[in-house]
Amino acid sequence: MRVLILGGDGYLGWPTAMNLTASGHEVAVADNYLRRRLAQEEDVEPLFSPPNLFRRVELWREISGHSIKPYIGDLCDWSVMETIFRTFRPEAVVHYAEQPSAPYSMLNRRAASLTLSNNLGVTSNLIFAVREFAPEAHIVKLGSMGEYGTPNIDIEEGWIDIRRNGREDRFLYPRQAGSLYHTTKIMDTDLLWFYVRMWDLRVTDLMQGPVYGIVTRETEENEDLLPFYFYDEIFGTVLNRFVVQAVAGHPLTVYGRGEQTRGYLNIVDTLDCVRLSLENPADRGQLRVFNQFTETFSVNELASRVVRAGKALGLNVGVTPVSNPRKEKEEHYYNPKHSHLLELGLKPHLLTDEVVTGMMQRVLRHRHAIRHKAIIRGVKWA
Ligand code: USQ
């Protein structure tokens, strides 16, 4: 299959590109290095700097023999999107090309505006490009479990049947996000659902939880193929942050009471979920929604696992609860369903102590590069 990855330079985009070529697909990646630029602007660069997309593509070809076609450009610019569609003619598109950080979206007016215009601009250009140049192409869109928020009822897999006054219908499960970034994901879903109804697009929305990990099957041998590893307050997700904090001797930053519960997954499982979704496409006129995570944990549970794994490596890991910079429930009911990807064949890689120590060992090699001042940046929700 010819697969176009929008956001192919990112934490998940680049490993997805390697994984899909290793599985026999023809891949192009598009990116404007937005994430690299924003991290530079905020002085929160990743633990190590991966080479640019052209060099990553060259290196991957030398190592694996697989080619990836890189396009550098801003996908909010219609002429960029149009050129890519005309020249590559994708049969499927994976859409990661978004400003992906909840804290960044809450930083200030400029960051909020960039998040809104970038995320919705790329999604709408993608929809129009598919309609015009590739109406049969399957769109696999990265959504977020955070779109649902933390309702006091079970979270269904995308849709909910509602019976009222003796009649029944099926609707998108109610969304109520906890950050502007997550709200743009809801708006993406609404746009896609509208055009699925109007133009019979094929769409899969992957409602993903926080991802952890660095190494994938394709990167094991070569550190220059690793994805970005952010550990700062703005771009780092919680478990990746805790692992770096443990190595750096910084107390783990549990926000508030630490009972916030989310659905997590290993980066290796993200790649499998995306590949399984592509290889089993949605029908024309169908919006499928898959909840993409493998296990739920509270922040306190993650912290205890990191403390335990740190001990095994001789690290003395402390935990210091910090006042919660976010506006979120710190204790809540959380029971999201997640069977569709398992039914398609996902074999989860669960969070064992070996996985956490493996991450720590990798981070230990880059210990000298950890900057304590990136760990807490004081971005407040309210
Ligand atoms: N948290 C801490 N301490 C930290 C960092 C985070 O206690 O140092 C807590 C947060 O308050 C939150 C939870 O850990 O309750 C998860 O936070 P996160 O930063 O790992 O994830 P989040 O900002 O919610 O967003 C991330 C990804 C996003 C994805 C989302 C899935 O950046 O792209 O969509 O995870 S979900 O969290 O289910 O919305």
Image (cartoon, rainbow, N blue to C red):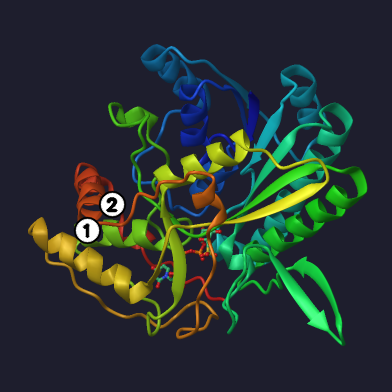
Q: Quadrant of the C terminus?
A: bottom right
Give residue 51's position: percent from left, percent from top.
43, 28
Residue occupying the far left of the picture? 314
Give residue 148's position: percent from left, percent from top.
63, 70
Q: Earlier in the sequence, mark 2 or mark 1?
A: 1
Residue 332 in view of the camera? yes
Q: Contact (CB < 8 A) between labels 2 and 1?
A: yes
Q: Secondary structure at mark 1?
A: helix
Locate residue 34 relative to residue 123 in the image: left or right: left
Tag count? 2
The residue lying toward the viewer, choosing from 198 and 122, is 198
- The residue that disc 2 covers is 370
Mark 2 CB lies closer than 8 A to ligand 1: no
The residue lying toward the viewer, choosing from 249 and 348, is 348
- The residue that disc 1 covers is 248
Q: Secondary structure at mark 2?
A: loop
| Label 1 environment density (alpha carbons within 10 Å; few <14, some 14–19, many ≥20) | some
What residue is shown at x 59% (from left), y 23% (from top)? 27
The quarter of the picture where residue 362 lies is top left
The quarter of the picture where residue 187 lies is bottom right
